[in-house]
Structure formats: C-alpha cells, structure tokens
Amino acid sequence: MTERGNFGSKLGIVLATAGSAVGLGNIWRFPYMTGQNGGAAFLLMYVACILLLGVPGMVSEFIVGRHAQTNAARAYDKLSDGRPWRYVGYLGIMTSTIILGFYAVVAGWCLQYLYVSLTGQMQGDSHYVQQYFADFSGNMWQPVVCGLLFILMTHLIVVRGVRKGIERASKWLMPILLVLLVVLVVASCSLPGAIEGVKFLLQPDFSKLNSHVLLEALGQAFFSLSLGTACLCTYASYFSKTTNLLGSAGQIALLDTLIALLSGLLIFPAAASVGISADSGPSLIFITLPNVFQQAFGSVPAIGYVVSVMFYALLVFAALTSTISMHEIGTAFFTEELHLPRRRAAWVVTIAAAVLCLLCSWSVGALDIQVMGLTLMDFCDQLTANILLPLGGMMACLFVGWYIPHQVVHDEFTNNGRKNLAYYRIYLFAVRYVCPVCIILVFLHQLGVL
C-alpha cells in the first residue's frame, strides 16, 4: 500500500488548513452579515464565538484525524470499533462533495468576472452591471464552463498529492491572497468619506446587540472555519505527531479572522465613500461592488481597473483554497477505501462535483430545476448550511467529548503530556458542554425556531 502523504512544515500545516477555512465566506459573507447585524457589535460577538466554538471544535476534529491517520470515514470507524459513529465521517464526506458542487458555480462566476475585469468589459452604469449578471448567470453554457474550469483547476492541484499539490499551492495562494487584500484595503480606506465605513466596522454600538446578532455570529463562526465538513479531520490525518493541535487551531482561527476583518475594511469604507449599503447579500460581489468600484475610482479609470482586477483575483484565490480542501476529503476517501490510485480517486470526485455543478448552474439560469420549492442550488446550500454542517459539528464534539477514551483525547491534546496541560480541562469542558449547546442554538436558529 502507498505511504500516506503528510505536510512537510508547520507553515504548510497552518496555511493549508487556514486555506480550507478562508474562502468566499470571509470575503463576501462576513461583510454582508456584519452589515446586516450592526457592524462592530457583530464583529465582537463573532470573535467571541470563534474562541468559544471555533477553536474547541477545530481541535476536536484534529484529534480524530491525527490519532486515526486516515480518511474521515475510516477515522471515525477506527475510533468507534465499527459502531454507528462511523457515519459521522461519511456525513462529512457527503457534505463536502455537495458543497464543492454548488460552490464551484459561484467560484466560476468569480472566474468570469476576473476575465471581464481584465479585458475591461465591466464598464457601464448600474443597470448595465445588473443586466450583465442576469444575462451571464442565465446563460445555458457560459457559467457551466466557468464552473467546470474551476473544478478542473482544483483537480490539477489535488492530484499532485498532499505535499507537492495542496501544501505547495497553499504556500503560494495564501500569501498572494493576503497581499492583494492588504493593497485593496489601503486603496479603499484612502477614499473620501471612507472613515465612516471604518467606524461602522470598528466602533461598536452595543444597543444593536441582541439574541439574533449573537446567533448570527455563532453561525458565521461555525461555517467560516469549515466545522462539520470532515475537512479538518482529513487535513489533521496529515499532521505529524509533534504538531501542537491547540496552537495550530489558534493560529488558523487568527488568520481566518484577520482575513474576515480585512475584507470588512475593504468593503465598508469603499461602500461608505459612494453611499452604497454593503448589506446586500448574495448580489454584493457581482452587482453592488462593481458599481462601488466604478463610482469610487471613476475619476481615475486606471485605478478602478486595477482595483477591480485585484478584487476578483482575490475572490478566485480564496475560492480555490476552499475547493482544494473539499476535493481532498473525497479523494482521500476513495484512495484509501477503494484502493484507487490518487489520480483515479481524484477523477471520481471531480466528475461527481462536475455533474452537480452543471445541474446547480442550470437551476439558477437556463432550466427550472427545483427541489422542495427551491432551485437545486439554493436547496443544496440550505441543506448543507442549515442541517448537515451543524449536525456534523455536533456529532464530532459529542464523539470526542463523550465517546473516545479519555486517555486518547488527553494524549492527543497534550502531545503525550508535553504541551497545553494547563488548557486541557478548559478544552474538555468546552467540547462537552459549551460547543454542543452553541451548535444546537445555531441549528435551531438556521431552521427558524429561534
């Protein structure tokens, strides 16, 4: 049997695993969620929830993956002696494959917008921008080709393996992403009137805090860190036995939060400068922001062109770091469970994701493909976000907190007593009691009960 791959450095571990979390959710979802929920007040709750739910949840999935040293399905099976807990791993693999399929549609849109920005085609008034998106997303084949091309880009990285493919790509993509983001933040914050956007993000109005804001922050923290997808479990199976799990989780959470914060500092000041609200949800990056860039930098078209190109390049890189991790979950499973060569296993995932991408793209444009009154794409989004992710995260915490032998959890968390001993009891309390309660609240909120 071929020896399993592994990450070659601590930097590779942090960048690759952070890349799995960093994606369109940070650059698109976080700003509009912040805009809809009180700005700085939401940001404070979000940071608190990262510490309360995100870090313990990440460490729990790390423990399962590193101890088992195998794909997510076999990891839960191995640690549960074949009992029903093994289905937690299968749930994560199914969830990640569904997400990869419909996520590729949006990633393909980003790829198209990068192309039209490069070629200077995204010029015109707000009506033109809105009509362009409607025409493009409704086209029979153009968005499909873009989505399939994105899946193929992901495939070409994953097929090269853990160290030569995933780790090497992450070491390039994550620094480029950060540099692009910082440059764009500087450009945005230098605009006239931008200070109002900065104040909105950083100056809290505690009168806006309520249970809804708290629950929205909990949900954003949960989804931002890829909890419940089996991604963290899969990546941890490539960690060395000397990796500091708590330290790595903290670094990843910090990097993920930093990118979300920088995204807010990019979008809110630019929107404030031209008097446009940045809480417009899914249309933000394809309708609202092209208008923002044109109005904000209209006096110097060359700057507007560069900013637009850099922004959509940023989105493409962010989406790619996420799709790599989602692809790897299934690839690792088919490689180890069906004993397929990595190249063939990767093609299985690529084809499955491509079929779903095709159907989801058609469902929001050319064809009326509906499930339970929703387009197939919206159904997949709501199924994973509202049900599968919270369920997977809940089961992972219960599994580590209550089922795995205490000594296994202790030894993995502390690296056999060499690290983090002072934090172990705090972690155990959080994963047994705090995380399950938080996830139940998120689950009920997503279903509209709270």
Image (tube, helix red, strand yellow):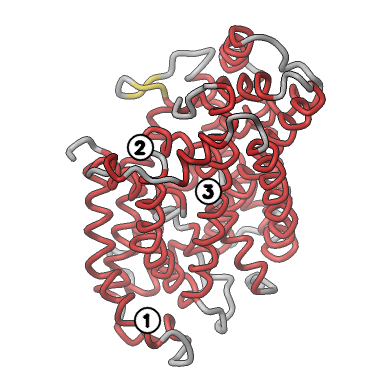
Q: Does 291 sit left or right of 90 as displayed? A: right
Give the foreground label among 1 and 2: 2
The answer to which image quadrant residue 267 occupies is: top right
Image spot of residue 67 (x, y percent): 46, 78
Mark 1 or 2, nearer chain start: 2
Residue 101 visible here: no
From the viewer's side, name the closer residue of 176 and 67: 176
Residue 413 got which mark? Answer: none
Q: Does 95 sit left or right of 310 as displayed? A: left
Q: Does 205 sit left or right of 32 as displayed? A: left
Query: How crowded is the residue under tag 3: few (<14 C-alpha within 10 Å), some, or many (20+)?
Result: some
Residue 423 got which mark? Answer: 1
Element marked by disc 1: helix
Q: Is residue 357 above or below residue 408?
A: above
Quarter that holds the C terminus: top left
Q: Which residue: 22% across, 58% down?
A: 437
Quarter that holds the N terminus: bottom right
- Furthest toward the bottom, the residue is 417
Q: Which residue: 43% across, 62% down?
A: 73
Image spot of residue 261 (x, y percent): 53, 48
From the viewer's side, name the closer residue of 188 and 322: 188
Residue type marked 1? Tyr
Q: Which residue is mark 3?
A: 261
Q: Which residue is mark 2?
A: 37
Q: Is residue 260 above or below residue 437?
A: above
